[in-house]
């Protein structure tokens, strides 16, 4: 019974994350702060699902609040092999992520770190700023005196590959568990944009 209850708990976290990823996939024409916040919230919940699956402790997962960077470190602590291609680097996180594309800022990073930032820029943005993204383009609490540039190309294939990797790592869905994204794709919903459906379909290819 305990094992079944633990599985249910972490699966529920994934299902909640999936709902936010659907929301992200449905927002191609808004200011970038809103889609970024939805994608970041999905990432936050997927990582919390990994913590719940690894520890069986929902309160521990919730204690991280919106801190994706610390959540990532916890996932790596629980499993050192956790998504190595995306592993967040402190040498990048300590910088001003929203200004890091400025040529003068790029010079501060090693070529390897710079390439890792370019490859994983959306993840670094939410890892550093998720608690503040809902305010963009207003001044953010964590950087009230600094303007920032936030560009979101939609559809962003990075999020698709990242979420696919996370769900595969979690081995979701286990038998008998509802997959809300697949359920959405299997329904005949006229209100869902065709580009949203096409984007989400790629999770299963």
Image (cartoon, rainbow, N blue to C red):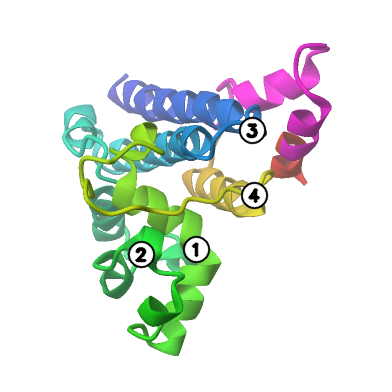
The Cα–Cα distance between marks 2 and 3, rounded to whole angstroms, is 24 Å
Tell me which numbered mark, 4 or 2, is placed earlier along the sequence: 2
Tell me which numbered mark, 2 or 3, is placed earlier along the sequence: 3
What SS does tag 2 mark?
loop
- Which residue sits at x=58%, y=21%? 176
Tell me which numbered mark, 2 or 1, is placed earlier along the sequence: 2
Name the quadrant containing residue 133.
top left
- As drawn, the label of residue 147 is none
In the figure, is residue 69 to the left or right of 194? left
Q: Position of residue 10 (x, y in %)?
A: 38, 30
The Cα–Cα distance between marks 2 and 1, rounded to whole angstroms, is 9 Å
- Span highlighted in magenta in the image: 173-199
Tell me which numbered mark, 3 or 1, is placed earlier along the sequence: 3
Reading the image, the residue beneath label 1 is 120
- Which residue sits at x=43%, y=40%? 40
Tell me which numbered mark, 4 or 3, is placed earlier along the sequence: 3
Disc 3 packing (10 Å; few <14; some 14–19; many ≥20): many
Reading the image, the residue beneath label 4 is 153
Q: Is residue 46 above or below residue 16?
A: below
Q: Is residue 200 above or below residue 148?
A: above
What SS does tag 4 mark?
loop
The Cα–Cα distance between marks 4 and 3, rounded to whole angstroms, is 12 Å
Q: Position of residue 120 (x, y in %)?
A: 50, 63
Toward the viewer: 47 or 79?
A: 47
Q: Are marks 2 and 3 in contact (CB under 8 Å)?
A: no
Residue 95 on the magenta span? no
Q: Is residue 89 above or below residue 171?
A: below
Disc 4 packing (10 Å; few <14; some 14–19; many ≥20): few
Reading the image, the residue beneath label 3 is 25
Toward the viewer: 21 or 185?
A: 21
The Cα–Cα distance between marks 1 and 4, rounded to whole angstroms, is 14 Å
């Amino acid at each position: 019974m305990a094992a079944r209850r633990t599985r249910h708990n972490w699966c529920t976290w994934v299902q909640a994350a999936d709902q936010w990823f659907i929301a992200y996939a449905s927002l191609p024409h808004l200011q970038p702060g809103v889609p970024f916040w939805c994608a970041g919230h999905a990432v936050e919940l997927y990582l919390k699902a990994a913590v719940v699956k690894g520890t069986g402790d929902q309160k521990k997962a919730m204690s991280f609040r919106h801190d994706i960077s610390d959540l990532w470190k916890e996932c790596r602590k629980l499993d050192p092999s956790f998504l190595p291609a995306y592993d967040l680097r402190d040498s990048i996180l300590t910088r001003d992520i929203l200004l890091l594309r400025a040529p003068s800022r790029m010079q501060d990073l090693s070529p390897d770190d710079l390439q890792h930032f370019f490859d994983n820029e959306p993840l670094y943005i939410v890892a550093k700023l998720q608690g503040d993204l809902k305010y963009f383009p207003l001044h953010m609490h964590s950087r009230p005196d600094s303007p920032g540039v936030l560009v979101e190309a939609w559809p962003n294939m990075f999020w698709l590959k990242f979420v696919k990797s996370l769900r595969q790592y979690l081995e979701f869905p286990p038998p008998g568990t509802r997959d809300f994204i697949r359920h959405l794709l299997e329904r005949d919903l006229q209100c869902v944009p065709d580009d949203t459906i096409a984007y989400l379909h790629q999770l299963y290819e």
